[in-house]
Image (cartoon, rainbow, N blue to C red):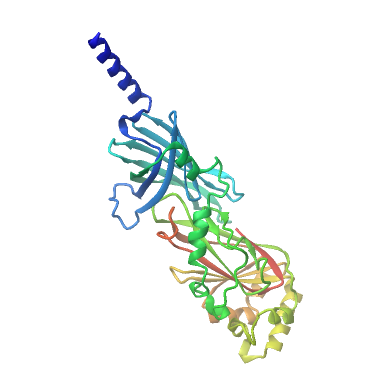
Amino acid sequence: MRKHAMALAVSVLVGLSGCGGSDYGPVTGRWSLTLQPSGQAATHPDAVTVERVYLNETNGAVNGRSDAFTFTGRRNGNQLELTVFSPDASGLAAEHSYLKLSLLGDGTVRGVGYTPQPQVSPSTESGGVENAPRLDYDVSGRLATPLSSGEAGAFIGPHGLGGAASDIVHTVCSIFSAAESFAMGYLTGNLYRPMGGCILAPSGGGYYVFGRDAAGSLLPVWTQNVYVPVEWAPCTERTYKFKFSYKGQALLTSGVEFIANSKHGPNYLPGLDLLKVGGKSLTDLAVELDDLRRKYGNYALLVAKHTRTGFVGLYVIRERGSSDDFKNEAVIKTLAGNLHATVKVGKEITDDFRLRRGPAPKVCLDQVEFSYLIGSADVTLD
């Protein structure tokens, strides 16, 4: 009888091991995961550690959350396979990355992951996007805090993204909550004029912090925005493709209205001086801005600066007319010269930026900052 009991116990343990039991430690809890380039140590400069990854296992099925990312997958013995989802441009969950991890039995995991890499194709005339080889990386981690299923479920919340980006909202919005944090704050005398509320509009593997509409809902001129890439990958670079499109007529249309709405207290915003040709007056500037609308229809002047490289782009979005003629207008040439900016003109303008991205925006911070200076056109940022 004793031999039979021991044999039964052994068979139960083997069965548990084969069905994702506790032999290799729990999955449910708060994990700390480090992503580093393949073959490199966790101390590599591009490695990033995500401190709050909540996982919950029920009968081998696993779900989880970390900031804006959600996880689904299965555990089989010591093997844990997870699909990482992130919000797409419409805010819905889209497959983003894939992880294959081994539980080591001491509260740690090791494994690999990969993220498909969309890249701008130089072979297409329009700069289209094609699939390039995926980004592979190594993963290591530890169980920081074991939790009950109920506790983990409370952190993870319902399936689907919902308010999953709340932590990223807090992190990113706190970074840009002061006017002086904008590299282009001198255009407004460091006056804080965001395009909209801090809502984090998802777009192409990252977020526009203050929505995707310029000039935005709060002020009709001289407003600011920032794009921050947030992806589940080590802190390495990839190419992001931006598109700025004419949306329609804006709230204001005349030069006098633009200048009047650029006031801050008793003074005009200092950026107006960057538009004035040859020391002309503000009245002359208003007339010149009206002339631009008469020639080219509604237009908008949008400035982008890549903070890390210092690149400045002046994007002139126009309703109609010649791009080359608009580029040679005295106001545009003066503004571009004062900003040391590269100029692009069109009803729809595309440009590319090499940005560092990662799952922890405070650690992997890279951004493109925008200012909608002035104009009679609304613009969609994408």
In the picture as drawn, the residue positioned furthest to the left comes out as 3
**Hey, which quadrant is residue 254 in on the image?**
bottom right
Observer able to see residue 122: no
Q: Check the image and report above or below for 134 versus 62.
A: below
Residue 175 in the image: state x and y as whole percent.
48, 66
Q: Give the residue displayed 43% in from the left and 68% down from the top.
A: 308
In front of the other: 173 or 281: 173
Q: Give the residue displayed 48% in from the left and 55% down from the top.
A: 230
In front of the other: 200 or 316: 200
Q: Check the image and report above or below for 231 versus 266.
A: above
Observer able to see residue 199: yes
Q: Give the residue displayed 61% in from the left and 90% down from the top.
A: 278
Q: Check the image and report above or below for 203 versus 222.
A: above
In front of the other: 254 or 17: 17
For this view, does 107 lie left or right of residue 98? left
Q: Quadrant of the N terminus?
A: top left
Q: Quadrant of the C terminus?
A: bottom right
**Hey, which quadrant is residue 247 in on the image?**
bottom right
